[in-house]
Image (tube, rainbow, N blue to C red):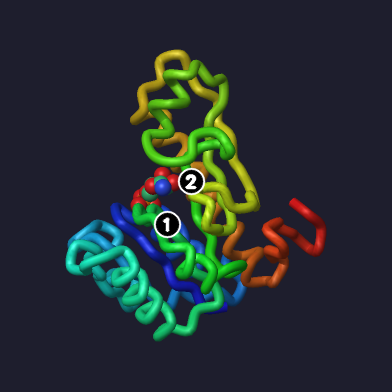
Amino acid sequence: CRIVVLISGSGTNLQALIDAARNHDLNDAQLVGVISNRPNVGGLKRAEQAGIPSVTLNHQDFPSREAFDSALLEQIEQWRPDLVVLAGFMRILTPEFVQHFAGRMINIHPSLLPKYPGLHTHERAIAAGDAQHGASIHFVTADLDGGPIIVQAAVDVLPDDTPTTLAQRVQAQEHCIYPAVVRWFSAQRLTMRAGAAYMDGKPL
Ligand code: GRF
């Protein structure tokens, strides 16, 4: 199973996948390419250190979202992936792009969706006084952070949590669940049909 990872930042989720692949925890999944829409981010160094080919496609170099997405699609397809993994990729993708990879693109979002799609999720969970917060992995559809959920991990919100301390505990969970989901996908256990996610043929 060939995997392309899209990033925008520090790439700690990418690192979790690199480490899992190295430990043979991803089945036959291979990380074949990494793309960042931001130059010089930490995740690109992680890819380089792991010997994974990487490319920067700076969205600011493109005249429109459509132009960026078509260059992105072309670059991804050069690596012939079975799965596209969004790991802290902070760009909204066009419906055409999303449709092209329907059922073979997943995203991790730092909230217990459907709560808090979009940005600043840790701040919002604390401001709302939530007892629990977490992360969700979902198939990507044209509905932003709204695709069918594959798995979620919850953490307790502690009385003295700041967005930073809460984010750290959520991210530790992200680094456990993302490799697991990639392993399931590579074992062909996960599918998306008619806008719903299935594991071993059973609805999730
Ligand atoms: C993660 O918390 C992810 O859920 C969010 O952005 C963060 C990316 O972190 N969308 P990293 O680049 O994997 O370190």
Side (left or right) of 21 relative to 161:
right
Q: Amino acid at mark 1?
A: Ala
Disc 1: CA contacts within 10 A as few (<14), some (14-19) or many (>=20)? many
Q: Amino acid at mark 2?
A: His
User: At 56% from the left edge and 45% from the top edge, which residue is drawn?
Assistant: 136
Figure quadrant of the N terminus: bottom right
Q: Judge by depth and name the residue closer to the eye, 92 or 84.
A: 92
The tag earlier along the polypeptide, 2 or 1, is 1
Q: Secondary structure at mark 1?
A: loop
Residue placed at 79% from the left, 63% from the top?
200
Looking at the rendered structure, which numbered label has been put on residue 109? 2
Q: What is the x, y in percent for residue 68?
A: 30, 69
Asked if the residues shown at circle 2 and circle 1 are in contact, with their CB atoms under 8 angstroms apart, the answer is: no
Name which residue lies at 51% across and 48% down. Answer: 145
Circle number at residue 87: 1
Q: Nearer the viewer, residue 146 or 127?
A: 146
Is label 1 within 8 A of ligand 1 (CB to nearest ligand atom)? Answer: yes
- The outermost residue toward the top is 159
